[in-house]
Image (cartoon, helix red, strand yellow):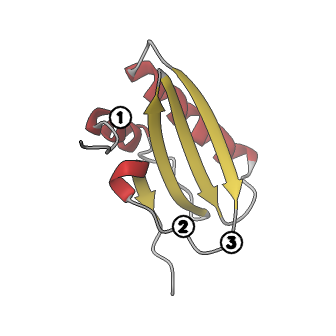
Amino acid sequence: MDASVDPRLRLSAQRALLGAISPDIRLIKVGLKTRTITFTVIMATAPTEQERDALSVAAAEVLSDFPNCEIIEDIIIDACPIPRENILEQGWVYLRAERA
């Protein structure tokens, strides 16, 4: 059984995020369970109002591709190492290059 996130959702998120990713964004991932899309962003610092707006617009664009769903936006401020997880199962769509 393939537990990876629907490729249509991943592509929708990547399209919606064009021009919306600022340097402090470390990771973005999406998921879909029972008609609820999760849009999770891990940032190095608290987002500015402009960054928050850009991410919210991107989330709305993703939602427009899935009109029968709802979306939960989650912005996490965290400087700890990025979690080790299966990137396909967890729906990673962006990962910033960081020094080890």
Disc marking residue 9: 1
Real-space Cα separation, disc 2 to disc 3, in angstroms:
11 Å
Helix, strand or loop at label 1? It is helix
Give percent across and percent down for residue 42.
61, 57
Q: Earlier in the sequence, mark 2 or mark 1?
A: 1
Single out the residue that lies furthest toward the front.
1
Real-space Cα separation, disc 2 to disc 1, in angstroms:
21 Å
Q: Name the residue under label 2.
A: 83
Q: What residue type is labelled 3?
A: Ala
Q: Which of marks 3 and 1 is nearer the N terminus?
A: 1
Q: Where 11 falls versus 90 (above or below)?
A: above
Q: Which amino acid does label 1 sit on?
A: Leu
Q: Which of 57 and 63 is in front in this view?
A: 63
Q: Where 18 falls versus 86 (above or below)?
A: above
Mark 3 neighbour class, 10 Å CA radius: few under 14, some 14 to 19, many 20 or more: few
Q: Name the residue under label 3.
A: 79
